[in-house]
Amino acid sequence: MSDIKVTLPDGSTKVLKDGATVYDLAASIGAGLAKAAIAGKVNGVLVDLTAPLYDGAKVEIVTEKSPEALEIIRHSTSHLMAQAVQSLFPKAKVTIGPAIENGFYYDFDVDTPFSPEDLNKIEAKMAELAKTGFRIERQILSKADAIRLFTDLGESYKVEIIEDLDVDSISVYRQGDFLDLCRGPHLPSTAWCKAFKLTSIAGAYWRGDETRKMLQRIYGTAFADKKELDAYLERLEEAKRRDHRKLGRELDLFSFSDEVGAGFAIWHPKGAMLRTILEDFERKEHVKRGYDIVVGPQILKTELWQRSGHYDNYRENMYFTEVDEQSFGVKPMNCLSHMMIYKSQLRSYRDLPLRFFELGTVHRHERAGVLHGLLRVRCFTQDDAHILCTPDQLDSEIKGVISFVSDVMKIFGFEYEMELSTRPEKSIGSDEDWERATNALLGALKDTGRPFDINEGDGAFYGPKIDIKLRDCLDRKWQCATIQCDFTLPERFDLTFVDANGERKRPVMVHRVILGSIERFIGVLIEHYAGNFPSWLSPVQAMVLTVTDNQLSYAQKVFDELRGAGVRVQRDFRNEKLSYKVREAQLQKIPYMLVIGDKEMESGTVTPRYRDGHNLEAMQPADFIAFIEEEVKNFR
Ligand SMILES: [Zn+2]
Ligand SMILES: [Zn+2]
């Protein structure tokens, strides 16, 4: 038998006996590595520890610490769950059980839906099976044998999957008496499933097909160790505590109503104030950066949507109505009015760039199933702008937008990541257009000095784009800003400008949003701050409270003075116990409480108390006003 030579990630080589496996390689490097190894990566492909190596292969040993480990652990835990389910519910048929972001699921065909108690039982059974430490073994079968095997087991879904596969042989994985069709790789034994938790049950159609049977899906999560699992579960709990739908109700910001219709938010006074603060902030920041505020109508003639291409490409997401026998489309985007403004006069290169900004309310049809609080609605307001510029101005315009995004993210305390999506196979526009726009986006990204990702071929057919995803304090990613170059609309609407030589040229069009949807952004903000908005954003910045009726007239004077100066203030002069009134204000997460007692009344002062319980020095009401103004000015 001849030897084989393999290369390790550090470039060194190892000579092994022919037929040696990934495990043998790990063992030849060291006993510690052999013990820690859970899988291998051969020429970039993940394989089982028992996979044989071949001459010339580039091999990496995967341990629990490797970035690839989590997916293997989660997928193996989904098999463990299926094994537990079948041992407890022998009639349950198995379907598929992939690893997903944050965990895994497995879909089962069972007669009775699983109950929460079932989940506990299944989890306990999983722990027992893990402890037994079944070896997880791969076996290769011919397609025909595999079909026979799963037919005998009564696993009709597996048979259906195999029949659809265009292959001759099929791999199955066995642990104890449980068998599953699978490509792998898997952990070497169930003993490696050390930290898992089943999280929820849901109905799911087989292959997403609503005409097929509804299956029972069990979601779970798994990690390499208990500590990581606990940290994750703690984050989940924290996310539940911060859920914007729950806080939105408790803080009386907004509501949804069946009588109104799904996906349409109703803004209560405090929520509407929060929106107004954000919108005022946006207007100011845009005007500062050379944008012109514009306003377009809510519905536009259907012919215009036909011309823009929305009718052909986006009709399913649009709402239509009729006025005087004329069909109108409710706008899903704000671009069209902005182009009509551009076209309202002859434009010279000296007029450019033009930056039209609109807090544009749009309607987009979303399936009822995907609606989710403020994060996914059917009516929302975008902080939308369209920049029309000469091709030469594109570079500096894109840079301007990116620095705008960076300034705004800093104010809210968000980290963010940027991605560039380039030309897809099917696209319109000249090579030159694409190159110029892509380079403008790329140059601006490089200029930031921050890392960014490139999604090759992922741009829209009408132009490349940058997507910016913010990270909240629970490390969740949210799409907010996008910067999109567009070659179609200027063409379709025949937008032109007169250049220095008196010739008509096409301007470049950039669609961009900074916060994206105001609704969505507020949902994210509520969860990010857990409802504890900084003063500048708080719908109510201060609450004036009386200790007894004795201070009524002074308290009213303080309230009037603050409100007159523009502080967002409320009062609680009820004849209730002070501790009760303080607690209510705290639950409302109001930043400052001004308790007015005899001491304050006599000295003509207020003693602000921050919502975390610490007191500021006693001060004149005018000084408190100045203090709040300073906080607002500095976005605190
Ligand atoms: Zn599998
Ligand atoms: Zn647009």
Image: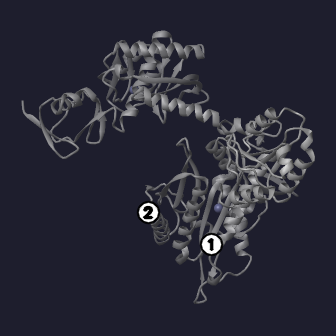
The label on residue 419 is none
Mark 2 residue element: loop
Q: Residue at x 80, y 35 (%)?
A: 258
Residue 239 at x, y = what percent?
60, 35
Residue 473 at x, y = what percent?
56, 44
Image side of residue 242 versus residue 319, left or right = left
Q: Which residue is mark 1?
A: 388
Residue 285 at x, y = what percent?
67, 65
Residue 618 in sight: yes
Q: Are marks 2 and 1 in contact (CB under 8 Å)?
A: no
Q: Could you say which is closer to the camera, residue 219 or residue 523? A: 523
Residue type (three-letter) at the residue carrying disc 1: Leu
Task: Place residue 67 in its image quadrant.
Answer: top left
In whole angstroms, how far apart are the C-alphas of marks 2 and 1? Answer: 26 Å
**Which one is closest to the eye, mark 2 or mark 1?**
2
The 10 Å Cα crowd at callout 2, few under 14, some 14 to 19, many 20 or more, is few
Looking at the image, tell me whether mark 2 or mark 1 is earlier in sequence order.
Answer: 1
Looking at the rendering, the quadrant in which ligand 1 lies is top left
Image side of residue 394 versus residue 327, left or right = left
Q: Which residue is mark 2?
A: 449
For residue 530, above or below residue 539: above
Cβ(mark 1) to ligand 2 < 8 Å? no
The 10 Å Cα crowd at callout 1, few under 14, some 14 to 19, many 20 or more, is many
Q: Residue at x 39, y 29 (%)?
A: 224
